[in-house]
Image (cartoon, grey):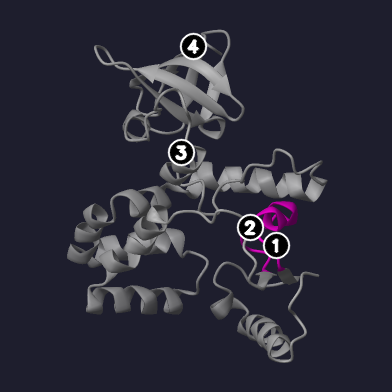
Amino acid sequence: MVGYEVVGSDDHKVGKVAAVEGDLLIVEGGLLHKTRHAIPKTFAHPDDDEQVVRLTISKDLVDDSPALKNGDVDRHAVAEHYGLAEGYEAPETEGLGELTPDDRAALDGLRQLQRDAGSYAHVQGQRPHTIGFALTDSPIGLLAWNGESMRDLDPEVLLTHVTIYWLTRTATSAMRLYAEHRRQQPPAGPTSVPLALAHFPHDIRPIRVCAERDHANIVSWHSYDRGGHYAAHQAPDLLVEDIRAFFGARRRGGLGTAL
């Protein structure tokens, strides 16, 4: 792909592929002042016949990404910029051994989610105040924005959430969580505090081998047959029981090491 023209989703020319480093394309752009940016391959679709790489993201998003310094790629900064370090995209799997078919399916699901439904995380993580002013000014806009990402909730629960945001005018401050998360430095190594995972079927599927790489003390890992991303509303009995079991065992001293 080196030398291929790169075109954004807005049909604007981004630059040319200067190199390929694993799962990243290094793209060089600019007229007088040349800069290089890293683009995750998950956003790139090469056309070998036309020698063009078509992106599912805009040129502006690439231009705003961290530029390479001395040819070095800050993978964490790149992942944070593109919203790939927030659970919407597969983490690096190099060196983790062979993934199971279920792991591969979960990986594909994460990538599909990022391509088709991850735009809100980019906006809220990068420009929370811009969209915040608009949502605080329009109850219809606030309902539409939240309804898109909270569509799995029952209508009355969704309306309750949106009403609280509207009456308290806290849409912007709520979205700042995404921006603040992006500013956090990642841990230097795997976490060691006891960690529990409860997975519900209508949500992002976890990949255990990746979780174990980043967390050294996973003490509880349960998958349930109902519920989803909003388990507190959709399957509160299962969620409460899981939390009680985790903390109950901690009080008894029975969950101090990984299972």
Real-space CA distance between mark 4 and mark 2, rounded to the nearest whole angstrom? 38 Å
State the SS at label 3. helix
Mark in the foreground, 3 or 4: 3
Real-space CA distance between mark 1 and mark 2, rounded to the nearest whole angstrom? 6 Å
Q: Find residue 103 and report its horizontal and vertical position in percent.
A: 75, 49
The residue pinned by badge 3 equals 78
- 233 in relation to 13, above or below: below
State the SS at label 2. loop
Q: Find residue 258 and report its horizontal and vertical position in percent.
A: 77, 69
Real-space CA distance between mark 3 and mark 4, rounded to the nearest whole angstrom? 21 Å
The image quarter containing residue 166 is bottom left
Mark in the foreground, 3 or 1: 1
Query: Dot 1, how many residues are within 10 Å of its Cα: few (below 14), some (14-19), or many (20+)?
Result: some
Camera-side residue of 233 and 212: 212
- 155 in relation to 48, above or below: below
The residue pinned by badge 1 equals 216
The residue pinned by badge 4 equals 4
Asked if disc 1 and disc 2 are in contact, CB closer than 8 Å, the reply is yes
Q: Find residue 182 and report its horizontal and vertical position in percent.
A: 40, 53
Q: Find residue 158 and report its horizontal and vertical position in percent.
A: 42, 73
**Quadrant where the C terminus is found in the figure:** bottom right
Real-space CA distance between mark 1 and mark 4, rounded to the nearest whole angstrom? 42 Å
Real-space CA distance between mark 3 and mark 1, rounded to the nearest whole angstrom? 25 Å
Real-space CA distance between mark 3 and mark 2, rounded to the nearest whole angstrom? 20 Å
